[in-house]
Amino acid sequence: MSTYKAIAGVSSSLKVLLRDRMTEAATITLAPPDVLVDSVIGRRLNLYLYHVGENPYLKNQEIPGEGYLGAYGHPPLSLDLRYIFTAFGTSDTGPDADVEAQLILGDAMRVLHDIAIITPNLVEQKAPPPQPRILDPSLLGEFEQIKITLQSAGLDEISKIWTALPNVNFRRSVLYEVSVVQLQSLLKRTIALPVKVNRVYALTLRTPMIQQIFQQPPAIDNQLIAAAQEGETLRLIGTGLSAPSTRVTMDNATGTISSLSDTQLDVVVPAGVLKSGLHSLQIAQDVSLTEIPGQPPVQRTGFRSNLVGFQLLPALGAVTPPSAKAGDTITVNLQPAVTATQEKILLLGDFAVPGVPVPFNSPPSTSIQFILPEAPAPAIPTGTYFLRVRIDGAESRLTFNPTTEVYTGPLYTVT
């Protein structure tokens, strides 16, 4: 398989092929088409690699017979190379200068039409015996052969290439694509050990399904909301929830199941593990498999339910001072602790006060500070407001009187 030298090897192979098989006398150069090549004057054909792209059809594909099913490491990088061919006559001012360049270009196109694939057994005909190979040594032994294709590019596409060059001097040109060039990865591969014992386990498919999630009991009667504080219970309604190894995962945490049946599950939100905000919840049911006769069964990944979301609400603690005016700092205690990167907003009625910024590497804190706006910013009018704190979209609760069906607090006074 080719190394990083394969790209340059393709250019070298094209140069040798054209130099050997063209009838018209011309020097083959590999340089930007808008520059003068040192010590080269007169008739010449220039090859310029203007684009290198990954082959989409062989992306992440192993070479047949090279890779292993249990191997780790990167497959080869498969590339397509695009060249612009430009012909130059003896001079630019002669009466037939362009005709001379056209002869050179036509001759080169004829060669690439006749030899569209550079095979390893292709040799230089003009060289004395032993005739060397045309294919560069860096490309020998490749599974993919070097294929040359004329691109049907319009004047607009070729003009874009020329205008991107520092010294614009437009000349007749043709575009060719060469594929596929594969570069070998240098990452080491590790081969998995062969399987010692083949075992097949047949299990009844019984995937749990979560259809509804809400706090139990609801904070407000008849409002089934997928939101809870630390230590509160979430109720899951669904099918296939009960199993000997049922557990509930909340992101990277595991909740304690307090009640379980096939259609209903109650789980307690763990404390001190999750941050306030949105989290995913899933039911996991592992299976016990006897892998070694005579040894105890081991737990293996079994069935997983669909993912559902819930909000962990911040629990509001002490608020100091008990009242404040414009420019004062309000300190609010919350659970769980709030990280430096979480969004923190104090809500006083319909007014929103952002939290005081802290360094991004600050440790999580249960004490959050807010400064009431003052002139020239619009100040919050004096009065008493319902107080809430929003952390990453999750808001602390207001107290509710079920008899009168009105909110009763917490309240905060702006003086």
Image: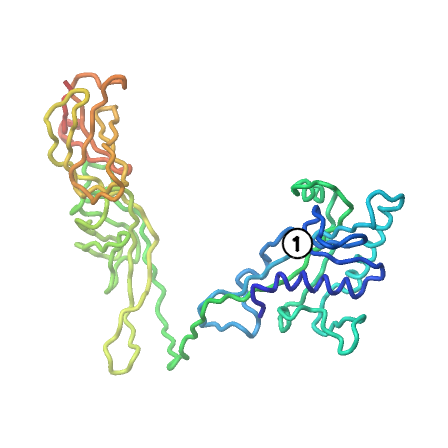
Q: Which residue does the image show at 68% across and 41% down from the upper left?
A: 167
Q: Residue at x 73, y 47 (%)?
A: 153
Quadrant of image for the C terminus? top left
Q: Quadrant of residue 390?
A: top left
Q: Amino acid at mark 1?
A: Leu
Q: Which residue is mark 1?
A: 49
Picture coordinates of residue 2, whole percent (x, y): 58, 68
Q: For this rendering, which residue is in front, 73 or 104? A: 104
Figure check: 412 above or below 362: above
Of the 4 image quadrants, the one containing the N terminus is: bottom right
Examine the image and state in which quarter residue 242 appears: bottom left
| Residue 410 shown left or right of residue 354 in the figure | left
The residue drawn where x is 85% and y is 53% is 103
- Position of residue 221 relative to residue 325, above or below, is below
Residue 393 place in picture, x, y as percent: 28, 37
Measured from the top left, where is residue 129 in percent x and y? 78, 78
Q: Nearer the viewer, residue 222 or 362?
A: 362
Number of other residues with Cα within 10 Å of mark 1, as a class: few under 14, some 14 to 19, many 20 or more: many
Q: Position of residue 334 (x, y in %)?
A: 16, 38
Q: Is residue 126 visible?
A: yes
Q: In this rendering, is residue 402 above or below 192? A: above
Residue visible at 70% across and 47% down?
35
Residue 80 vs residue 163, the one in the foreground: 163
